[in-house]
Amino acid sequence: MAYSAKIGPSILSSDLSCLGSECVRMMECGADYLHLDVMDGHFVPNLTFGHPMVECLRKSVGQDPFFDMHMMVSRPEQWVKPMAAAGANQYTFHIESTTNPGNLIKEIRESGMKVGLAIKPGTTVEELAPWANQIDMALVMTVEPGFGGQKFMEDMMPKVSWLRSQFPSLDIEVDGGVGPDTIHKCAEAGANMIVSGSAVIGSDDPRSVIALLRTVVAEAIQKRSLDR
């Protein structure tokens, strides 16, 4: 099994007036990567930030943190080169937002970034499947994209289980309402990349929350390898 437990705080949950120091704080608390939500007000109703902010963050935090860009945008093709230039490491786009996923995957690769492919709760996992061997990570949304603080949708877990059974070494990310109360369900289903916003960043002790999430996922991975 090529995958491992990775915890990525969603920085949109932090105090946006001191984003650079919040990113540093999360890495110091043991985060494996940082999850950055880009929303354009079209694909989702909310509006966040774009590549100028990413460029500033990269300068502020240095080269080490892995930036996983969750592109909740209507025209993901438009932002590949600017995000790569800004210092993004992984470009995760929504399958619902493009008519030519294959082309976009190729473009992201050529720009030097890893490729993530996301599906909304209403999208079947079978729509993602044809591309699973061409991507680095599949993101199964466990809330409707666009707003933080929503309730975790447990009925998305069969998608994760199916992906894990069909593509055993794929990185599978879950995003939305994930924290200490819901992590066991995600881990048991086979998710290994865990996005957590308010549960980590809003905690009095983010380090212990990150450690807990990682332990639960690592134990589930180990159990799965022993069961095979």
Image (cartoon, rainbow, N blue to C red):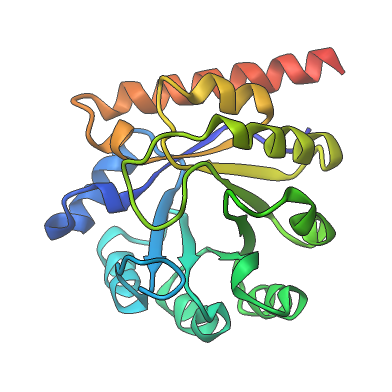
Q: List x then y, in percent, for residue 151.
A: 40, 35
Up/down of 221 relative to 125, above or below: above
Q: Which of the image's four quarters has the C terminus?
A: top right
Task: Estimate the x, y position of residue 29 in percent, counting from the top left.
Answer: 31, 33
Is 199 placed left or right of 182 in the picture? left
Image point 65% across, 66% down: which residue?
A: 95
Image quadrant occupied by the N terminus:
top right
- Using the image, determine if residue 151 lies above or below residue 54: above
Residue 80 placed where, x, y %?
Answer: 54, 79
Residue at far left of view: 17
Q: Quadrant of residue 96?
A: bottom right
Q: Is residue 204 left or right of residue 169?
A: left
**Residue projecting furthest to the front:** 122
Q: Position of residue 30 (x, y in %)?
A: 38, 34
Asked if 188 appears above or below 91 in the picture, the reply is: above
Q: Residue at x 46, y 71 (%)?
A: 43
Say whether residue 191 is visible: no
